[in-house]
Image (cartoon, helix red, strand yellow):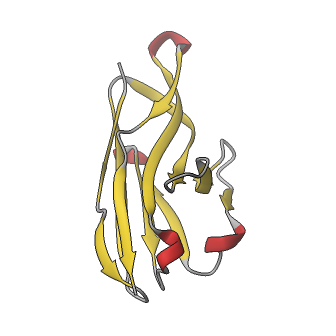
Amino acid sequence: QVQLVESGGGLVQAGGSLRLSCVASGSISSINSMGWYRQAPGKQRELVAGFTRGGSTNYADSVKGRFTISRDNAKHTVYLQMNSLKPDDKAVYYCYADVLRNYNRRWSGWGQGTQVTVFS
């Protein structure tokens, strides 16, 4: 079984910064894709930033220039550095991953989510 564990959420004033971390644990051979979504109250879950299988990154237009995704492949970990936070960034942030396990079994899923609250 694969587990995704997020950390780093919290309460921050507008203009401040937070860094989220997500660790994938379990019998993982390789990671196809991994990144972050978020869901604000009453809204659909949306992609924030992620790595594709080829290693390229995708960002939501609303966070470009403010958020940076990075990873540590050896630790199966992705990070999301969030700068210049705005009240609109308030949401539950979910880590996702699509991985290959032993014997080429594929797994995809979500973490439990971490709350980010930005106050003005």
Residue 69 or 115: which is nearer the viewer?
115
Residue 109 percent coordinates (x, y): 48, 30
Residue 113 percent coordinates (x, y): 37, 46
Compared with 43, 85 (above or below) is below
Compared with 24, 61 (above or below) is below
Q: How many numbered tags mark residues here?
A: 0
Instruction: Tell me: 91 left or right of 106.
Output: left
At 52% across and 54% down in the image, what residue appears? Answer: 38
At 50% across and 70% down in the image, what residue appears? Answer: 89
Question: For residue 118, which quarter of the picture?
Answer: bottom left
Residue 4 or 31: which is nearer the viewer?
4
Compared with 43, 89 (above or below) is below
At 44% across and 54% down in the image, what residue appears? Answer: 93
Q: Quadrant of the N terminus?
A: top left
Q: Residue furthest top?
A: 103
Q: Residue furthest front?
A: 42
Residue 99 percent coordinates (x, y): 52, 29
Q: Quadrant of the C terminus?
A: bottom left
Residue 23 percent coordinates (x, y): 34, 45
At 56% across and 80% down in the image, what residue appears? Answer: 66
